[in-house]
Image (cartoon, rainbow, N blue to C red):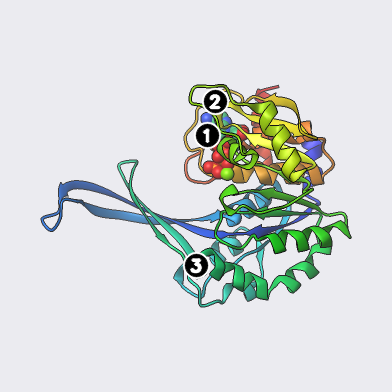
Amino acid sequence: MKALLDKIADLKILVLGDIILDHYIWGDASRISPEAPVPVVEVDRDSYVAGGAANVALNLVALGAKTELCGVTGNDDAGIMLRGLLLEHSVAYDDALGNSEIPTILKTRVIVRRQQLCRLDRERDPDSYSAILKDHTLDILEKIEKFDALILSDYAKGVVTNELITEVQERAATCQALVTYDPKPKRRLTHHGLDLITPNRAESLEMAGVEMEPHQPYPAEEVCARIWERYAPRYLVITLGGEGMLISEKGEVSKIIPTYAREVFDVSGAGDTVIAALTASLAAGATLEEAAHFANTAAGVVVAKLGTATATPEEILLYGAANE
Ligand SMILES: Nc1ncnc2c1ncn2[C@@H]1O[C@H](COP(=O)(O)OP(=O)(O)OP(=O)(O)O)[C@@H](O)[C@H]1O
Ligand SMILES: [Mg+2]
């Protein structure tokens, strides 16, 4: 794994997708409001984390790759906070996409005694974000030849569209850059022949158009065959939460790689770690199976952490060695 990490340190990877700011309000609640039957939260502190495509970018930097991020942020406080986080973590970000009048996508979670009380979402409809990205597509396509791989990180907020996938794929083919995609099937995008797609279990069923009866085993063969028929990805990796990940080529199930037992604190963002680690290792020349082992190890590091959702080479080597 050390040799793989050394090669990843020489890579340049571009992330294109929906940038989100995750805002947490931490507090305590011991009484009910006299104004309405709701708890009164005494706020202790606020914290901010880069989410969505920005979290994929942070994961790549943590692995050692040089990383640029393209996606929409607004000319508002959340945008300033996000661009500050990107700068702090050495993620390059083209400010041309950060000055729009559109609000930065902001998700505020109110957490009381480790319990989420509610979530407040601030965002516009997907077409508004698509429109802004569209104005900058030519500049983005120009950049592609500088990169070894390109990750499309779709959170169904509008940045990733059919046109964008096609244009990116065409341009990447001229310079042998990998194009990988973490999909949100509810967008119903019609891609074909991408290098890698990484749906989770529920997303894989939706992409395959397979209904699963409750308490039935996951229909792996059927799902892989259907996704191959519809989308023909070179590699398909389906993440199965605590059961690890399934790898598939040409519609056949190749293998299921289990997770290594460990204490889990926070599984949110593990999918971002997986697409980052798979893309980086494939671009570094790993086989699909090597890449999946590497990504499983990186995700294992991340789910054992609270708060930060990235894994460094040192942590991966340590955790990997413990499970050999
Ligand atoms: N309980 C767990 N124990 C160990 N590893 C886990 C656990 N849950 C997730 N993982 C690791 O994280 C990977 C991705 O998890 P999952 O299938 O939940 O992705 P996801 O639903 O896309 O996540 P996200 O919420 O980030 O979108 C798994 O393949 C596995 O390697
Ligand atoms: Mg996911």
**Which one is in front, 181 or 1?**
181
Residue under numbered circle 1: 304
* Crowding near the residue tagged with mark 2, few <14, some 14–19, many ≥20 C-alpha atoms within 10 Å: few
Q: Is residue 14 left or right of residue 102?
A: right
- Number of marks present in the image shown: 3
Q: Is residue 275 left or right of residue 171?
A: left
Residue under numbered circle 3: 104
Q: Quadrant of the N terminus?
A: top right
**Upstream in sequence: badge 2 or badge 1:** 2
Query: Does the numbered disc 2 mark a residue whose Cβ is under 8 Å from ligand 1?
Result: yes
- Label 1 SS: loop
Figure check: 67 above or below 180? below
Asked if labels 3 and 1 touch by Cβ distance under 8 angstroms, the answer is no
Figure check: 60 above or below 317? below
Residue 302 location, x and y as percent?
A: 57, 39
> How far apart are labels 3 and 2 at the CA level?
36 Å
Asked if labels 2 and 3 touch by Cβ distance under 8 angstroms, the answer is no
Q: Which mark is residue 262?
A: 2
The kind of residue on which mark 2 rests is Arg
The kind of residue on which mark 3 rests is Thr
Q: Residue at x 58, y 62 (%)?
A: 158
* Crowding near the residue tagged with mark 1, few <14, some 14–19, many ≥20 C-alpha atoms within 10 Å: some
Q: Residue at x 83, y 62 (%)?
A: 171
**Upstream in sequence: badge 3 or badge 2:** 3
Q: Quadrant of the C terminus?
A: top right
